[in-house]
Amino acid sequence: MPYELDDDTTLTADASGLYRGRMSDRWNVGAVPNGGYVLAFGMAALKRALPQPDPITVTAHYLGPAAAGEAEVEVHMLKAGRQFCTATGGIRQNGREIVRMLATYGDLSQTNGPMHIDAVAPIVPPIDHPPLSLEPPMPIAIRQRFEQRFADNGGAAPRAETRGWIRFADRRPMDTHCLGLIADAFPPAVFNVTERGWVPTLELTVHVRARPRSNVLHCVFRTRFLFGGFLEEDGEMWDEAGNLVAQSRQLAAAPRLQ
């Protein structure tokens, strides 16, 4: 049987290159599909449409909320080069565009060059560590799709930072096309310093740096600025071999109660 994410991002293409599928409610936060899952749905079309195997950078602007049900993705190639190709993609439901993507793809198996890394993988709980009790402000179906363990602050002053490890509950292997989902799968870091509530994503960018070499990823997400009704969240995703596999930045609206 297919893994849940692959099953829930299955698309068919018609003669014009339009990709159609059905968004699942298994990745919902409340009544709305998680923004990272919606991005993964769109990236499933990019994967099929583009000649290069790996996303290098993908940016999604969220124009409206998604819903479980039929959806379509229209991909337009902007440039097809020898090393990189760039395309746009629009996700539509009920005749309305809900997400606009801009992506550049390449082949991460062929990358080389100088290296300078001024960071280390985050310290996360052991794989058998008991989970922390994090009471959600609303039903979160997506929680059932993953196994996660979160680090606590150890008595330190509250920081808008979330650290921990994550893997798919059905043990799906990590790959470059699921990293947009992982970038939005942790509780928002801002919950450590403010009330919990709905945090709608306006824009999410993922820079993919390497193909994951493990099915568990060590992640850290931080928010430094919350004001004017908006926040940013910066993320790092590392594999168990100590390789940085992706970075993310998200702009979202400040938490609000439904």
Image (cartoon, rainbow, N blue to C red):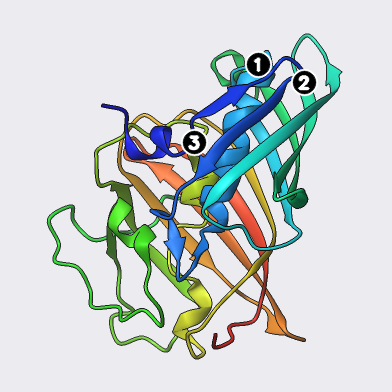
Disc 1, SS: loop
Q: Position of residue 49 (x, y in %)?
A: 68, 20
Residue 85, numbered label: 2
Spatial separation of the CA atoms under disc 1 and disc 2: 7 Å
Marks 1 and 2 close (CB-CB < 8 Å): yes
Q: Quadrant of residue 150?
A: bottom left
Q: In this rendering, which labeled residue sits more in front, label 3 or label 1?
A: 3
Query: Which of the two marks, 2 or 3, is nearer to us in this view?
Result: 3
Please tell me whether mark 3 sits on a helix, a strand or a loop: loop
Residue 9: image tag: 3
33 vs 43, left or right, is left
Dot 1 or dot 2, earlier in sequence: 1
Viewer-side residue, 109 vs 104 = 104
In the picture, residue 137 is in which quadrant?
A: bottom left
Is residue 48 rendered to the left or right of residue 94? left
Q: Position of residue 175 (x, y in %)?
A: 44, 31
Residue 58: image location, x then y, percent = 69, 40
Residue 53 x %, y %: 59, 18
Describe the element under mark 2 as helix, strand or loop.
strand
Mark seen at residue 52: 1
Q: Residue furthest top?
A: 82
Q: Earlier in the sequence, mark 3 or mark 1?
A: 3
| Residue at x 76%, y 59% (from the top left corner) | 63
Q: Is residue 215 above or below residue 37?
A: above
Residue at (30, 42) in percent of width and height: 216
Q: Quadrant of residue 230?
A: bottom right
